[in-house]
């Protein structure tokens, strides 16, 4: 499937006639955010015009292919969204429907009446936000040392850190809980956040990015007598914004959606997160009121979607501003 | 960049402060007052009734205060172990009955033999329900629910097919199901099924134990596998024929799938727990409840059970207080209130169906509850036994040879029982 | 080397805050788990030393061996598929000539951010053989999809596809971030030389992305070897244990059978297997890494 996705977009660049090559170079290659064909050369020779039209057609095809593929990839998401607006009798009905035949907001009303929604959302923000902020700070520091400072045992340390990712968390959950419990943190945000304030995944991820940044960037700063801290703060971090944002998104999403962690470390319903709170909608016999569950999840996922929308824009902006390229 | 770092610093401090503020203070015993924590998984209206009963108990005396914490049954299973590992478990915990033997065998639960011997309310608990609590000859819990699997049927579809009497024997049952199975376009795949019969992960794991018992077969007897009996071979052959030749039910269904199929109106009957009553109502299905029809040998239904127990970590005083609550819970009035509120039949044998007639679902379940059998009572490794059984039933309904399948399942079950 | 001490101190300053947390909350629990793997611990109460019994059981219990085989199959299917899908989509989405890139980037990321329970519901709503939407549509076209999640031959490919669907968005975003770091001048020069899109992809994009590729490859491999919750909610390990994975066994022996000792032993076997496979993978990538920088 991905092959069909890939081909049109790439083909349009691959088969571009040579005559347009120079204008393309002028636009600055693959990272330009300006629209494509329309801005091509001012004086249109017939050959150029033909090429432009062909490129437009290819763009159109690639758009259609992408839209179709996106629809199928998003079909489950579309089901989730529409199910949130269906009455229970329609969720289970045969024949199944994609779009509700009868729209209802009851599912959303039930969420707000049956769960302390505001409190759960606030807890989720403190938990996922707290972990994300701490992890970004601690992970980037460790990753910088692993990527940019030479010290003995560096590779062993890196391998040890990566190895710690390889033990399933089910095996360490109980020792972690005993530790957290000994510290008296059960039912606090400390229990939720501090054990995850640094994580091997983030360190490994940022290290890979920091290693890729060209060395000449910081050697200039070093010649000027900048300290490691300065190089880290003023050279490496600003150039790693896409990586930092990616890690932030990942950490936030994973913690926001984590089910077992908040359930294990908090027994007090006041301390639950939105994800753990939604489990309480499960009825006897494990029967889940799907409409209500989808409504709850839809609200729960909104902050994540908005955050990502914001971040993916920053991707492009950050590249434009760092001057790295 | 500095601004960003400053923001981070503020955020980290704020988080730490929040963490500090919310540290909960644990209650200490002053002048002999006892505080107990009670985890249960009653998340719906039943949970509110249970919390009400606990409140009433707290008010009825001034020595013990019980605080309930609601988690789903799955979550209790996932979090009880971690809590126990740090000595932070609840004093009272409710769990699906088949989970109790594991915890009891690992010495997580307190022995309740004295409670059963001394308490006059405990003496009234129905025998099969209490059987769920017995592990290696000792009692480790009390039942909070024990209900027979029953057949839910779609009255509208029954009327349309002209089936007026609910079947009472397997043969009648299959006949009725055939009438209710509709394959209009004749492509061999019915559009409507007479029955939704799960062949694995069935509701409360009880569908096949019920059917086996209907033909006089069992799964485990005296800590040995007896699943490979000729009776069970017959049972599997009987139902395999009904599903594959008569197509009265799809194969490959699990308990959740049968619930859904019934809810969608594509199946006229399903075997389910009492919650199917409210599920049917929500799905606008005009339903009736009936006992599972009798097999060639007997009428039998496996029970879905919930137990509550006292953790071994509770101090002797706390254990005593918990038993006091149990006694209150089984007093006749409270037991009746709980039955009506939970929608499950009364756990005391001396509460007649008339006392619970105000809840028609409870009344009809109480009527059929005399033949309810506990599922694998006292079997510690029930997970492995049941998964061996599931493999047989699913493969047999997919056309496998029952004799051969039961033979290998029997070996697996014996191994599980030895571990 | 002048300033060696100075540099060690600086390194320590960068490392200590993060490593402290890792040592306390990851390292120490791992040591505890290692100790437990030689005992019959249940997690509470008394525990006895049982030597290598738990490890012997890992390699002799046929159910465990089957789950190891399943995990291997899952990893072989999932890892390349997820990485390739993510990479191709990232390259396509990085092409400025594709309109509405922001829209596609956001929507294609959505499967990653919805919670698993919800995604499982949606897939079952699609795939249910009797009342599922996909089956209903296909039946209209005269095609029968069958009961893919209950068919021993199809269950594994199906859960792999669902897992790829759930996770490609994240790998795609990592690749997108990596693609931002490739200097555009490289492509310009290649175009001048008349390299076509495929040549540019193999000669510039792939080598330049080697660090990112190494990372995504290892992370996807680790995720695959630890496959648990996505399968748990879709098939519960069935039919006939054909999708039962190692981590499902770890979870069940630890949290259902209360046999923490065995769960820990199995975890360590998984860790060592993962470590070996990753070192092999990283070894290849490491050679490339040097070439690239």
Image (tube, coloured by chain):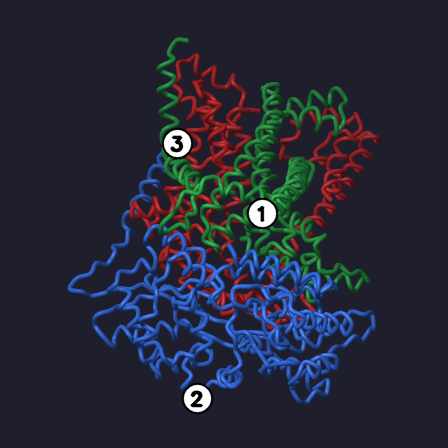
Of the pair A126 and C184, the residue shown nearer to us: A126
The x, y position of residue C127, in whole percent, is 68, 59
Q: Dot 2 lies on which element?
A: loop
Q: Dot 1 lies on which element?
A: loop
**Residue sitting at x 37%, y 64%:** B93
Precedes in sequence: disc 1 or disc 3: 3
The x, y position of residue B262, in whole percent, is 64, 74
Alpha carbon distance from label 1 to label 3: 38 Å
Residue highlighted by disc 3: C19
Asked whether residue B78 is in view, the answer is yes
Asked whether residue C180 is in view, the answer is no
Of the two numbered discs 3 and 2 in the rendering, the one whose residue sits closer to the viewer = 2
> Is circle 3 on the same chain as circle 2?
no
**Chain C drawing hue:** green
Alpha carbon distance from label 1 to label 2: 50 Å
Which of the 4 quarters of the picture holds residue A101?
bottom right
Other residues around mark 2 within 10 Å, as few (<14) / some (14–19) / many (≥20)? some
The x, y position of residue C99, in whole percent, is 68, 42
- Residue C61's label in the rendered image is 1
Image chain in blue: B
Residue highlighted by disc 2: B352
Residue C152 appears left or right of B311: right
The x, y position of residue B393, in whole percent, is 66, 65
Of the two numbered discs 1 and 2 in the rendering, the one whose residue sits closer to the viewer = 1
Q: Dot 3 lies on which element?
A: helix
Chain of the residue where label 3 is placed in the rendered structure: C
**Residue sitting at x 39%, y 22%:** C11
Alpha carbon distance from label 3 to label 2: 66 Å
């Amino acid at each position: 499937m991905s092959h069909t996705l890939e081909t049109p977009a790439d083909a349009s660049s691959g088969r571009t006639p040579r005559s347009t090559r120079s204008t393309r170079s002028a636009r600055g290659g693959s990272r330009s955010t300006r629209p494509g064909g329309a801005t091509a050369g001012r004086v249109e020779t017939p050959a150029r015009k033909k090429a432009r039209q062909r490129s437009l057609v290819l763009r159109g095809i690639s758009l259609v292919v992408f839209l179709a593929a996106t629809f199928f990839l998003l079909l489950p998401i579309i089901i989730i969204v529409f199910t949130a607006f269906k009455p229970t009798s329609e969720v289970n009905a045969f024949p199944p429907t994609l779009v509700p035949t009868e729209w209802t907001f009851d599912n959303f009303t039930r969420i707000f009446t049956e769960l302390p929604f505001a409190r759960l959302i606030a807890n989720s923000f403190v938990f996922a936000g707290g972990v994300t902020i701490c992890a970004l700070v601690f992970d980037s520091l460790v990753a910088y040392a692993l990527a940019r400072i030479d010290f003995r045992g560096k590779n062993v340390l890196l391998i040890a850190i990566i190895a710690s990712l390889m033990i399933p968390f089910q095996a360490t959950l109980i020792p972690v809980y005993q530790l957290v419990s000994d510290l008296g943190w059960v039912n606090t945000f400390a229990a939720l956040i501090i054990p995850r304030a640094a994580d091997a995944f983030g360190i490994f991820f940022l290290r890979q990015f920091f290693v890729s940044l060209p060395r000449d960037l910081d050697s200039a700063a070093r010649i000027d007598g900048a300290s490691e801290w300065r190089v880290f703060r003023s050279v490496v971090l600003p150039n790693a914004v896409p990586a930092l944002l990616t890690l932030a998104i990942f950490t936030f999403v994973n913690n926001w959606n984590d089910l077992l962690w908040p359930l294990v470390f908090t027994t007090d319903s006041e301390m639950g997160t939105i994800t753990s709170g939604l489990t309480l909608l499960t009825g006897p016999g494990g029967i889940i009121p799907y409409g209500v569950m989808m409504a709850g999840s839809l609200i729960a996922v909104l902050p994540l979607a908005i955050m990502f929308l914001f971040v993916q824009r920053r991707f492009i902006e950050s590249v434009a501003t760092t001057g790295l390229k | 960049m500095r601004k960003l770092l400053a923001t981070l610093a503020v955020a980290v401090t704020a988080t730490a402060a929040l963490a500090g503020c919310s540290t909960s203070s644990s209650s200490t015993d002053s002048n002999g007052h006892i505080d107990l924590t009670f985890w249960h998984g009653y998340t719906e209206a039943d949970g509110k009734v249970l919390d009400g009963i606990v409140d009433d108990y707290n008010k009825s005396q001034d020595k013990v205060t019980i605080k309930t914490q609601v988690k789903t049954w799955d979550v209790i299973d996932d979090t009880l172990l971690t809590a126990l590992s740090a000595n932070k478990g609840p004093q009272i915990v409710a769990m699906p009955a088949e989970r109790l033997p594991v915890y009891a065998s690992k010495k997580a639960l307190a022995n309740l033999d004295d409670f059963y011997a001394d308490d006059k309310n405990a003496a009234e608990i129905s025998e099969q329900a209490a059987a769920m609590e017995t592990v290696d000859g000792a009692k480790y819990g009390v039942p909070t629910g024990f209900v027979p699997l029953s057949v839910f049927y779609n009255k509208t579809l029954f009327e349309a097919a002209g089936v007026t009497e609910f079947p009472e024997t397997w043969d009648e049952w299959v006949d009725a199901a055939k009438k209710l199975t509709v394959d209009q376009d004749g492509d061999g795949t019915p559009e409507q099924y007479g029955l939704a019969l799960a062949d694995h992960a069935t509701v409360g794991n009880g569908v096949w134990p019920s059917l086996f018992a209907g033909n006089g077969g069992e799964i485990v007897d005296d800590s040995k596998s007896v699943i490979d009996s000729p009776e069970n071979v017959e049972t599997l052959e009987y139902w395999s024929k009904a599903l594959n030749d008569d197509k009265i039910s799809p194969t490959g269904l699990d308990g959740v799938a049968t619930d859904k199929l019934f809810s969608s109106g594509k199946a006229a009957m399903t075997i389910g727990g009492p919650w199917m009553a409210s599920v049917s109502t929500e799905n606008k299905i005009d339903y009736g409840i009936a006992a599972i029809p009798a097999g060639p040998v007997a009428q039998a239904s496996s029970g879905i059970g919930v137990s509550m127990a006292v953790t071994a970590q509770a101090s002797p005083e706390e254990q005593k207080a918990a038993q006091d609550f149990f006694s209150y819970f089984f007093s006749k009035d409270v037991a009746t209130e709980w039955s009506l509120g939970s929608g499950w039949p009364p756990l005391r044998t001396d509460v007649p169906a008339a006392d619970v007639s105000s809840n028609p679902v409870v009344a009809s379940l109480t009527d059929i509850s005399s033949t309810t059998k506990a599922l694998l009572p006292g079997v510690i490794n029930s997970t492995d036994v049941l998964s061996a059984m599931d493999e047989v039933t699913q493969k047999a309904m997919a056309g496998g040879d029952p004799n051969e399948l039961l033979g290998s399942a029997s070996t697996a079950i014996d191994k599980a029982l030895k571990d | 080397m002048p300033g060696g001490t100075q540099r060690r101190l600086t390194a320590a300053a960068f490392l200590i805050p993060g490593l402290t947390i890792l040592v306390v909350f990851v390292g120490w629990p791992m040591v505890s788990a290692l100790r437990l793997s030689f005992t019959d611990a249940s997690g509470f109460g008394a525990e006895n030393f049982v030597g290598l019994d738990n490890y012997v059981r890992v390699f002799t219990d046929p159910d465990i061996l089957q789950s190891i085989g399943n995990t291997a199959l899952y990893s072989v299917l999932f890892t390349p598929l997820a990485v390739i899908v993510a990479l191709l989509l990232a390259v396509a989405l990085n092409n400025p000539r594709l309109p509405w890139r922001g829209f596609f980037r956001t929507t294609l990321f959505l499967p990653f951010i919805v919670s698993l329970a919800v995604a499982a519901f949606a897939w079952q709503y699609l795939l249910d053989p009797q009342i599922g939407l996909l089956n209903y549509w296909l039946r209209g076209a005269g095609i029968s999809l069958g009961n893919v999640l209950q068919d021993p031959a199809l269950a594994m490919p199906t859960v792999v596809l669902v897992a790829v669907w759930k996770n490609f968005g994240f790998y795609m975003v990592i690749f997108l971030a990596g693609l931002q770091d490739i200097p555009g001048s490289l492509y310009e020069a290649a175009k001048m030389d008349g390299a076509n899109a495929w040549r540019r992809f193999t000669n510039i994009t792939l080598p330049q992305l080697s660090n990112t590729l190494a990372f995504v490859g290892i992370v996807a491999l680790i995720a695959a070897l630890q496959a648990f919750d996505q399968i748990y909610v879709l098939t519960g390990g069935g039919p006939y244990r054909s999708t039962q994975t190692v981590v499902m066994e770890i979870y069940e022996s630890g949290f259902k059978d209360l046999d923490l000792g065995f769960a820990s032993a199995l975890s360590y076997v998984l860790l060592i297997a993962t470590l070996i496979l990753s070192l092999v993978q990283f070894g290849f990538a490491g050679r490339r890494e040097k070439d690239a920088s």
